[in-house]
Structures are given as structure tokens and as C-alpha cells.
Amino acid sequence: MNIRLLVFLTVLTHLSFAGCRVIISLTAIHFEASPFVIGVLLSLLTVIPILFALRWGRWVDRAGVHGPMLAGIAAIFLAMVLGWLFPRLETLFVVSPLAGSGFFLYHIAAGQAAAMIGRPEDRIKNFSLLALAFSVSSFLGPTLSGFAIDGIGHANAMLALSAGVLVNLVALTVWKPDVPHHGSTAAHQEKRRVSDLLRIPGFRLVFIVSSVLSMTWDLFAFVMPIHGSQLGLSATTIGLILGAFGAAVFVVRLLLPLVAHRLDEWRMLITAMLLSGATLIAFPLVHGVPLLVALSFLLGVGLGGTQPFIMALLYEKAPAGRGAEVLSVRTWLINVSQTGVPLMFGALGAVLGMLPAFWAMGASLLVAGWFATRGIDSKQ
């Protein structure tokens, strides 16, 4: 396997999954489900991965990437076929956790493959290309699903968007990519605990930084529409502001592979945290649309390039034979964040308004950036 092939597989897999996620929401609305039921359906995407994240990560470490990638793709395909065969609201309660579990498994295996392709110094570039693949499919999946629903209906849209994982399923069934394992098999025989990882020098710092940046991403996607509505902005304008963020993420990820080898991981992460923290603190103080678009783009620049550096640092510090386990812990933290951040900051915003929500996250980023500076200076 080479990185170009991995990017191709990832675009198709995530295109199907992102489309499936949108179709689940719009199908539930079509069946007149309440907002609570729709929320439950979307939360089911991450419930099973939260419960089994570590076990699946360790499976990828033991078995390599081919079997888990194939299993994850097959689960997404099966979920979408079920949604096509049985177009009822009740079916979505099976489709959602099955598709979410399949994508989580594929995501961990793809991260493992990106880390093991080429030389260690190629990891940031590989992770940057993988992140770019997710950005492309994040745009294509929802866009194509909308056109498909309007053109051929909800159930048939589910079948049409499953074409991406079907292509990958056939490809990986007839062809087994060769990706080396991470470390020796002896490491698999040892009793492993997450607490052991946190004792590794610098590891806690990487996890803290990863968690804070992930929370920031989820917070902005959650509070920006609320903040925009409170300002009296139209849905189109709010979409434009969010689109500026997505455009910046795409541009950064497009350029990052060209310059990744020249950049220091920690300096980039600290700069991103400080820039993003200052942007979030300024955000609720601005009411003009052009400035809101500019701040959104600036936040996207700060956050867009962090994922490849975090994954490269985690993999660099991972003990032999535990690379995928480490990546699964990070993904578990992201899933928890996606579940908890809307609840936490929604409650804060309901009581105190959106300004404290922006400022709390901005201050967290600034503190994390300061802590990271001290951490690398003292080599914790």
C-alpha cells in the first residue's frame, strides 16, 4: 500500500459514511421524528465506539490493517443496505450504530497504515494527506446525499451513497495490501493498560492538547449557529461563516504536505492553540459579518493543521505494538467530546449566554498553550 491508495480508499469510505450520517438525519425528519429522537440517532454513531475503542485498537495492533479495514467497510455497507431494504424509522436505530462502528474501525486502521507507510519522517506528510482526504469527503458526502435524496428519495439515496464502500469492499476482498506492523509481536503478550501510556514522558501533554483542540472544534460547530441566530443573521449568512472555517481547514491541509518536513510539531501546535484561543475570545465581541467570516477563517487556519502533528507525536511516543491502541484512545476522546461538548456548553450558554462559552474555550486554549510551552521546556 502507498499513501495515494490509502487516500483514495479513505475518500470513498468517508464519503459513504458522511452521506449516511446526513441521510439518517433527513430520513428521521422525513418520518417526523422529534428533535430528541434525531439527537439519539446521531449519538448512536459514537456509543459503541466509545465502549469498544481500546479493544478495537489493540485488534488492529495484533492483526494489522487489512482485516479491520475490511470489517469496518463491510459494516458501513451493511448498514446502508439495511437502510435501503427497510426504509423505516426503527431501522435507523440499527443503521446508526453499525455505520458509526464501521467507520471508527476503518479510521483507526487507516491511521495505523498512514503511520507505517514510508519512513518515520514521512508521518506528518502522510497524516496531512489523510486529513485532506477527510476534508474532501466531508464536502462530497453531504452534498451528494442532498442531491440524491431530492432526485431518487431517501432509501435509494442510501443505496447510491453506499457505492463508495462497495468499491473498497471489492478491492480489499480481492487484494490484500502489505503494511508492516508497529513493533514486535512480543509487545502483544504483555498486559497493557492505558495508565501505562500516561506514564510515558510527554504523553499526557499530547493527550491534553489533543482533547482541548478537539473540544474547540466541536464547540465552534455547536455555538456558532446559536450565536449567529442571536445576532439575527440568516441561515445563509451563518452557513457562509461556517463555510469560511471549512475552507480554511481545506487550504491548510492542502498546503501542509508540501511544508510539513520543515515544521516543528510542538511549535506548530502551540502557535495553533494561541491563535485559536485569541480568536475565540474575540469572536463574541464582533457583530459585523465580514469580520465574523475573517475570524472563522482564522480559526480554521489555527485548527486545520493540528491533527497531523498530534497523530505523528502520538505515534512517535507509542510503545512498540501499541500504535493503533494509542490512536484509538485519541479517537475515543474525540467521540466523548462530540457527545459531551454540546451538553456542557449548551447548559452554560442557556444560563449565561454565548459569550462565556466562547471565552471559556478560548481561555482553555491559551492555558493549554502556556502549559505546553512549559511542558516541552521541562521535557515532561
Image (tube, helix red, strand yellow):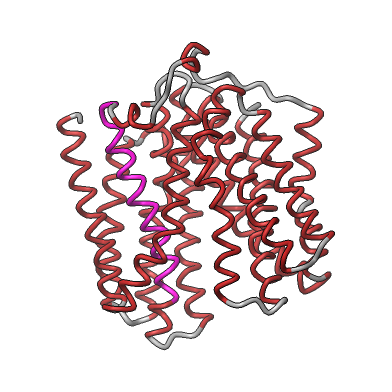
Q: Position of residue 372 (x, y in %)?
A: 22, 42
Q: Is residue 200 above or below residue 237?
A: above
Residue under the image location 31 percent in, 50 percent down = 272
Q: Is residue 94 above or below residue 23?
A: above
Q: Position of residue 202 (x, y in %)?
A: 27, 31
Q: Is residue 205 magenta?
A: yes
Q: Is residue 8 left or right of residue 273?
A: right
Q: Position of residue 175 (x, y in %)?
A: 77, 26
Q: How many marks?
A: 0
Residue under the image location 24 percent in, 67 percent down = 359
Residue under the image location 26 percent in, 27 percent down = 201
Query: Nearest the camera: 35 or 140?
Result: 35
Q: Position of residue 186 (x, y in %)?
A: 49, 11
Q: In the picture, residue 207 is in which quadrant?
A: top left
Q: Is residue 218 above or below residue 190?
A: below
Image quarter in which the C terminus is found: top left
Q: Is residue 174 magenta?
A: no
Q: Is residue 42 above or below residue 175?
A: below
Image quarter in which the N terminus is found: top right
Residue under the image location 55 percent in, 68 percent down = 39
Q: Main secondary structure of the magenta part?
A: helix
Range of residues picked out in magenta: 200-225
Q: Is residue 44 left or right of residue 164?
A: left
Q: Is residue 207 left or right of residue 21?
A: left
Query: Nearest the camera: 127 or 371?
Result: 371
Q: In the picture, residue 338 is in which quadrant?
A: bottom left
